[in-house]
Image (cartoon, rainbow, N blue to C red):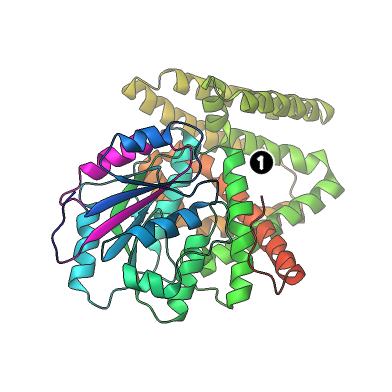
Amino acid sequence: MTDEPSVRVSVIIPTYNASAHLRRCLVCLQGCTPQPLECIVVDDGSTDDTVEIARSFSVRLLSTGDRSGPAVARNLGAAEARGDVLVFLDSDVLVHPDTIERIRTAFRDDAELDAIIGSYDEAPAYRDFLSQYRNLMHRYVHREGSRRASTFWTGCGAIRREVFRQAGGFEAAYRRPAIEDIELGYRLARTGRKILLDPEIQVKHCKRWTLSSMVRTDVLDRGIPWTVLIFQSGRMPNDLNLQWHQRASVVLVLAIVLVALIASFFHRGKFLEPLLTILFLILGPYWMEAAFDRTAKSLRVALAVAFASFGSLAWWMKEPTFLALVLAGYVLFAGRQIVSNRRRFFIALGWICGAYLLIASLVVFLQNERRPATLVFIGLVFVLLALNLRFYLFLYRHLGKLCMITAIPFHMLYFLYSGAAFLLGVLQFYRHRHARPQISS
């Protein structure tokens, strides 16, 4: 690989059992113009054919020797790099043809620039709902973030080699993918280094998300250690995932759950059943996607259990109307899933499903008894929707109205477990106040 002498770029890619995406990652890197000076792949104890795939390309292959974590792998690659600028990429991203050139241009045109980070693009590789929602949420956060960044990102981030060396590299105590990039960014910002966020420097994310992997990552690998880092550094910038409306949304969701628990205790099924009816209808497209996915066995079991529980509640409360509304909605959602390869019918059924959701929600609301707890609950939900309206409109433009609506419960769940992760992080900080940051696993 060759590069213009003005800004020499070394690309560093840590890998661990990355055979699913590494080949495409390296092929896309080969398509960049101009090419980087070198590409360094650092294997972190893979047990699949990751090493063989790397050897089939013109890359420098290094090894940590055993499972040491991506922080150690990146530090090893950086120590061997010859470029003036180090570009860190994850093994499950695909660079755009102009990604490297945009990075080179940024450093060439701004001699004071110390580091720069990019963003995921708006077309994630996996087309299932959860992967689309999750990756687009990351894209939106970076698109709306401050251009003068206060953190670093190794999905696609670049830093001058000398600045990286002076900062001491990534914190090796993080033994699994976590917040080692954020921690480095905090150190850089604390010493006055100039970090920029350019959402036009883009990569495509190839990660397929599941509900369990999403919660595990956000709580154990991000939320808890990030909270510990915030308290250790005394920094909570109003940026990216920590913007004021995100913090307010966490408080609102916790209040919504508290009101729901109290109302359920005092009013039982009379409060729960209308709430569950709306929730089931909103999640209908996601449930139907899971039902048609042969790999989603656990979700199909969960759907059956949820339906059985909801049906039992409807029978106990003598409210068959709610169950009928849900079943009718799911028939429509299933029909839409069946004709998903026929665009005209797919769009028509989408409008029908959307109209049905609106009518069914109105029926449920009119049948629901007016209680103070119900009105408070609805009011809190509307405030939450208003705070995050720009994000939901962003999802609407990319996923359509049904997926936008379906994303709302998942977004609320995100705020809920983010709040729980923050509380757990506070507890961990005070328990190990003088310890180095540890990652829960």
Residue 422 falls in image quadrant: bottom right
Q: Position of residue 256 (x, y in %)?
A: 69, 55
Q: Residue at x 48, y 31 (%)?
A: 48
Is residue 109 found left or right of 19 in the rendered image? left
307 over 216 or under it: above or below: above
Assess whether residue 24 is covered by the magenta stretch: yes
Q: Residue 35's spot in the image, x, y percent?
A: 18, 50
Q: Is residue 414 magenta?
A: no
Q: Across the whole image, how many numbered discs are drawn on residues?
A: 1
Task: Please say if 378 is above or below 196.
Answer: above
Q: Position of residue 312 (x, y in %)?
A: 80, 26
Q: Residue furthest right?
A: 266
What residue is rendered at 58% in x and 54% in y? Answer: 175
Q: Nearer the viewer, residue 131 or 52?
A: 52
The amino acid on which the numbered mark 1 sits, given as a three-letter code, is Leu
Left/right placement of residue 264 relative to residue 287 reads: right
Q: Provide the residue designation for mark 1.
A: 366
Q: Which residues are magenta?
A: 6-35
Q: Is residue 19 visible?
A: no
| Label 1 environment density (alpha carbons within 10 Å; few <14, some 14–19, many ≥20) | few
Whether residue 346 sits left or right of residue 173 in the image: it is left
Q: Is residue 439 above or below residue 397?
A: below
Tell me what residue is drawn at x 41 percent, y 50 percent.
Answer: 393
Q: Is residue 59 visible?
A: yes
Snapshot quadrant of residue 418? bottom right
